[in-house]
Image (cartoon, helix red, strand yellow):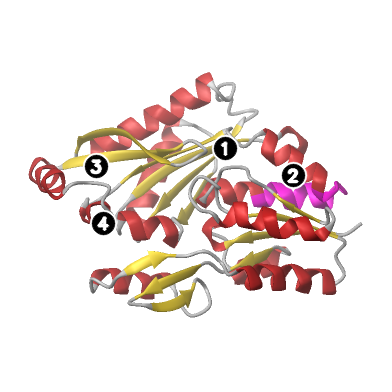
């Protein structure tokens, strides 16, 4: 049985990278000044941040039903028997719930995974799914494993400016102005369902310390602790147009977790459009036992 793995660009996996790894990737749509763009198709990250810097009206959207179904049909036409589709968290978008409805017409051949992840943690789920498919597991079995571990991940994000959260109505103008005067850095978290406020502090140095300590606590209390000889988690750094700072943060994390590998990636545009450029994030996902070598 041939099982295909499909995700969307909210995983951070580009269409080109997915093609190299045998993973199908659905581009996410964005509306910029009333015109639709598709991530990785006619909208690059560089163009996206240029739009933001110019003050363009940028909003997220969901893949059209026809685009999702056409992708599934194309995959079946290429000889696959089943599909595991891993979209972004249902707590952050309705695209997952809609896909579950579409899949009801496919007699179980399309399994939509609602494992509450986005960005680098969603990417890890996709890589896990590909490994499980290569081991011969069915789409239903893969879905069951990924949903079993759906809350075994964490992301903490600090933003450089509150302007974009203010624009989206998540922070009042007065609150944003006060934060700028006091150099306050909010820290947000994604623990499955949605993006939530976690903490606030003064300056990026303190923000990184708080995020690193939060990850340490999660690893100790939720993921069985850290053993360099037998790591229990994947660690990653994500950023919005802030690569050099992300590399520096990765070095600090490696000092705290000797022997670990740190994956660095850009945050998906669907998060970046709400928080703007200059953000930093740390993430971890518990290693799935079925995927360990």
Residue tagged by mark 1? 285
Q: Counting residues from the N terminus, which is met first, the one under dot 2 or under dot 1? A: 2
The residue at the point 21 percent across, 34 percent down is 201
Residue tagged by mark 2? 143
Above or below, 269 relative to 156: below
Q: Counting residues from the N terminus, which is met first, the one under dot 2 or under dot 4? A: 2
Q: Counting residues from the N terminus, which is met first, the one under dot 3 or under dot 4? A: 4
Residue tagged by mark 4? 164
Q: Counting residues from the N terminus, which is met first, the one under dot 4 or under dot 1? A: 4
Distance, label 4 to label 1, CA atoms, is 28 Å
Distance, label 3 to label 4, CA atoms, is 18 Å
Q: Counting residues from the N terminus, which is met first, the one under dot 2 or under dot 3? A: 2
Q: Nearer the viewer, mark 2 or mark 3?
A: 2
Q: Pointer 1: residues within 10 angstroms few (<14), some, or many (20+)?
A: many
Q: Is residue 242 visible?
A: no
Residue tagged by mark 3? 204
């Amino acid at each position: 049985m041939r099982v295909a793995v499909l995700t969307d660009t909210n995983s951070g996996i580009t269409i080109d990278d997915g093609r190299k790894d045998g993973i199908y990737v659905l581009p996410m749509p964005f509306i910029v000044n009333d015109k639709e763009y598709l991530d990785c198709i006619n909208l690059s990250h560089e163009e996206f941040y240029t739009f933001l810097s110019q003050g363009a009206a940028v909003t997220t959207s969901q893949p059209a039903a026809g685009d999702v179904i056409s992708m599934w049909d194309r995959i079946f036409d290429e000889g696959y028997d089943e599909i595991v589709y891993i979209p972004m968290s249902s707590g952050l978008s309705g695209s997952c719930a809609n896909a579950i409805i579409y899949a009801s017409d496919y007699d179980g051949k399309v399994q939509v995974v609602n494992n509450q992840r986005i960005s680098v943690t969603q990417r890890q789920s996709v890589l896990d799914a590909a490994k499980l498919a290569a081991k011969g597991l069915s789409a239903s079995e893969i879905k069951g494993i990924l949903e079993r571990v759906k809350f075994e991940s964490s992301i903490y994000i600090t933003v450089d400016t509150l302007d974009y959260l203010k624009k989206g109505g998540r922070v009042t103008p007065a609150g944003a102005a006060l934060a700028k005067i006091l150099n306050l850095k909010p820290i947000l978290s994604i623990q499955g369902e949605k993006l939530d406020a976690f903490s606030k502090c003064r300056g990026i140095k303190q923000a990184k310390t708080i995020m690193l300590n939060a990850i340490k606590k999660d690893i100790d209390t939720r993921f069985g602790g850290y053993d360099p000889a037998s790591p229990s988690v994947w660690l990653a750094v994500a950023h919005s147009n802030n690569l050099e700072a992300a590399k520096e943060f990765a070095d600090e994390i490696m000092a705290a977790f000797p022997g670990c590998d740190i994956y660095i990636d850009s945050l998906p545009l669907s998060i970046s459009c709400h928080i703007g450029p200059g953000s930093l994030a740390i993430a971890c996902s518990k290693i799935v036992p079925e995927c360990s070598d």
